[in-house]
């Protein structure tokens, strides 16, 4: 395995900041008090503002995209998440590992036919590992 280059570091840092911003917006959407302008949320706002497909906040799912964003993830890289599941999630505005990484038990329960697969294959854990730049568990 080769050492990460500067681009890998920048992508990893942007991903961490974006996940923090997803959590921040989920807190706001659920009416949970939080630090409105910390460094993480400011960085996340900058990242989201640069997107060509402006996201919105769904009361249950958190950040969702009306169209596939410029910087999307191939969700099928998550073990147990096939093309049908990816199409289902994309149809609900979910295109990034960071979105899955921020899911709560309420979100999983709302996924109907895929809820059991989310839990059994640990989609949330795998997504968090990918966002944080660590390899997914075997």
Image: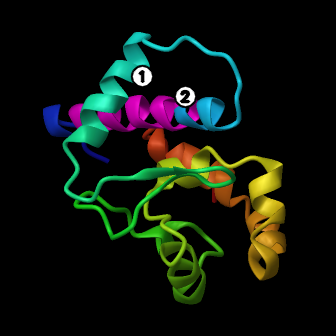
The residue at the point 77 percent across, 60 percent down is 108
Using the rendered image of the protein, determine whether residue 136 is visible from the camera's viewpoint.
no
Out of 9 and 43, give the one closest to the viewer. 43
Mark closest to the chain's N terminus, 1 or 2 = 2
Picture coordinates of residue 13, whole percent (x, y): 32, 29
Instruction: Identify the magenta region.
Output: 9-24
Position of the C terminus by quadrant:
bottom right
Query: In the drawing, does residue 43 fall left or right of residue 40?
Result: left
Residue found at x 24% / y 39%: 49
Residue 86 locus on image (x, y percent): 52, 78
User: Which residue corresponds to mark 1?
Assistant: 41
Is residue 10 toward the left or the right of residue 63 in the image?
left
Q: Tags 1 and 2 in contact by the CB under 8 Å rule?
A: yes
Residue 127 image point, x, y percent: 56, 52
Quadrant of residue 120 within the rendered picture: bottom right
* Disc ID at residue 24: 2
Colour mode?
Answer: rainbow
Q: Considering the numbered disc 1 on the image, is that residue within a helix, a strand or a loop?
A: helix
**What is the C-alpha distance between the residues marked 1 and 2?**
7 Å
Q: Position of residue 106 (x, y in %)?
A: 82, 53
Q: Secondary structure at mark 2?
A: helix
The image's mark for residue 60 is: none
Identify which residue is drawn at 75% across, 46% down: 104
Q: Is residue 132 visible?
A: yes
Q: Find residue 9 and report its image quarter.
A: top left
Residue 17 among magenta residues: yes
């Amino acid at each position: 395995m080769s050492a990460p280059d500067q681009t890998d570091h920048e992508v990893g840092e942007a991903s961490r900041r974006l996940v923090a911003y997803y959590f921040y917006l989920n807190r706001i959407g659920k009416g949970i008090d939080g630090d409105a302008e910390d460094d993480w949320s400011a960085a996340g706002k900058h990242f989201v503002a640069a997107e060509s497909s402006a996201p919105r906040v769904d009361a249950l799912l958190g950040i969702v995209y009306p169209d596939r964003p410029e910087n999307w993830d191939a969700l099928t890289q998550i073990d147990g998440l096939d093309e049908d599941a990816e199409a289902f999630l994309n149809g609900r505005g979910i295109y990034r590992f960071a979105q899955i990484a921020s899911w709560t038990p309420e979100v999983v329960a709302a996924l109907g036919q895929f809820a059991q697969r989310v839990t059994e294959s640990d989609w949330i854990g795998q997504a968090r590992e990918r966002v944080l730049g660590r390899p997914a568990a075997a």
